[in-house]
Amino acid sequence: MTAANSWICLILLWIAAETNGKTPDVQLTCIFSEDCVLPCVFEAVGDEMIYWFRQNVPIQSYIQGSGRLDQADQQYNSRTSLFTEMIPSGNASLHIQKCGPQDRGKYRCLVTSSQETTEQFIIVKVEAPIQSVSLETTRLSGFEEVICSSQDAYPAPRVNLFTEPASLPDSLQPFTRKTADKQGLYSVESKLKKLKDLTYICLVQSFYRSQTWRASLQEKETFSVEGQDLIIPCVAPWKLQNFTLTWSFTKEHKSSTIYTYDSLTQRSSSVWKENMRLVTPRGRGGDGSLQLHNPLSLEHTGTYTCILYAHQTKHEVHTRVNITLKPEKQQSESSPQRWIPAVITGLAVTAVAAIIGIIKSGCTKSSKIHGEATEMQPMRVTVANSRAASEDTCLTEEIANRPA
Ligand SMILES: *[C@@H]1O[C@H](CO)[C@@H](O)[C@H](O)[C@H]1NC(C)=O
Ligand SMILES: *[C@@H]1O[C@H](CO)[C@@H](O)[C@H](O)[C@H]1NC(C)=O
Ligand SMILES: *[C@@H]1O[C@H](CO)[C@@H](O)[C@H](O)[C@H]1NC(C)=O
């Protein structure tokens, strides 16, 4: 009975204390499988009794002076403890080892002494943060799908997989699955059928909204003509501040990095020096689009992969680029030796023009005549395009400058 009376007394005291300015509840997030310390401090006078409760179930108690430690709840017996050496200085924090889902809840630290009674509430959440998110295409079901997945998070995160532009609601509904392992950690997976020319976006948000991971994936195909400058877009759906950009090129199963840029150090490296540049200087805001200058069919046809990485964010674009020869040239040689017949033709045309006697008037006039000559010979467009051949006085100089 006396015990019950003292409890009632405590509760009354607590109510009184509460009206005089209650200490606000402490919100605490403990990390899954790590140790956690639930704070509880008081003004030590020396005869304190300390009680810890979880969801109103007593789990630990300690009586100063006697040094008696009671572990009320067997479930917590092995994993919770008080820093008994800290109690005389007013620290009754509770130590929980290897936090798990069972440790969530509302804890109460009750300290009574001959002087006063204090009570503190601690709301404990347990979280296993998202560590990674992957967004990729697979063919596991026999058709192409885009799968967004994340492993080992707690509580189960929310997954939102969608396309941009938004596709027809019926044809594209993501199928989402969440599974828990023995420890209680969740794996989530969401998949969508893959359609052409869509950007797939996946947002994975932790249960308590403390983290949002973003991933996007795009696969495209582009045709272009040799010699024509080409832009391969890579624009993240989000503004990015601190990011790294990597472009790689894959041809016949061989992949190599052709460009990298780090926005923090502002360092870049480029393998195809003068043949490429970024469309937006320093990829500002997350625009990593690449411009290919004077691409060649043989060398530059292949798959270009752009990856933008930022904090909890990844944007990936695969572009299959097919650079075809110019229509007029398709039957002719595409080897480097093509310059030899071109030069010979140029010389021949110039000679013909000289014979006709029009060339006497000089460079400008001859180029006009030359233009007419090539229209009649569509196979020699290369020559017509080069100023060298149409301006006889500049001819030797230009040829000397040309790469072998
Ligand atoms: C109480 O003691 C624990 C264990 O030494 C420590 O982690 C915590 O910071 C202490 N709290 C205060 C308020 O000193
Ligand atoms: C980018 O990095 C700088 C330097 O580390 C930092 O001060 C800034 O807050 C970061 N910005 C973002 C959006 O992460
Ligand atoms: C590029 O396009 C041409 C014409 O459509 C096609 O014949 C060729 O096979 C393509 N090359 C590659 C590598 O896809």
Image (cartoon, rainbow, N blue to C red):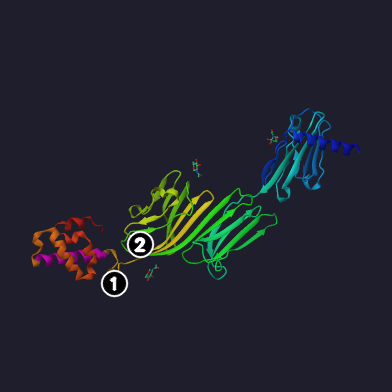
Question: What kind of residue is marked 2?
Answer: Glu
Ligand 3 quadrant assignment: bottom left
Residue of label 1 = 331
For label 1, count other residues whose C-alpha is less than 10 Å away and answer few (under 14), some (14-19) or many (20+): few
User: Can you say whether 130 is above or below 372 in the image?
Assistant: above
Q: Label 1: state its secondary structure.
A: loop
**How would you classify the magenta stretch by its main secondary structure?**
helix
Query: Residue 256 appears at what percent x and percent y?
Result: 43, 57
Query: Residue 2 appears at what percent x and percent y?
Result: 90, 36
User: Can you say whether 96 is above or below 245 in the image?
Assistant: above
Q: Quadrant of residue 326?
A: bottom left
- Asked if disc 2 and disc 1 are in contact, CB closer than 8 Å, the reply is no
Q: Quadrant of residue 337?
A: bottom left
Label located before the other in sequence (2 or 1): 2
For label 2, count other residues whose C-alpha is less than 10 Å away and answer few (under 14), some (14-19) or many (20+): few
The residues colored magenta run 337-354
Q: Classify the position of the C terminus by image quarter.
A: bottom left
Residue 88 in the figure: left or right of residue 141: right
Q: Classify the position of the N terminus by image quarter.
A: top right
Which residue is found at the position 44% from the left and 49% from the top? 285
Residue of label 2 = 299
Residue 346, magenta (yes or no): yes
**Towards the viewer: 86 or 170:** 170
User: Can you say whether 157 is above or below 10 in the image?
Assistant: below
Query: Residue 161 appears at what percent x and percent y?
Result: 56, 60
Q: Label 2: state its secondary structure.
A: helix
Residue 171, magenta (yes or no): no
**Towards the viewer: 324 or 156:** 156
Looking at the image, the residue that sits furthest to the right is: 1
C-alpha span from label 2 to label 1: 18 Å
Question: What kind of residue is marked 1?
Answer: Gln
Which residue is found at the position 40% from the left and 49% from the top? 269
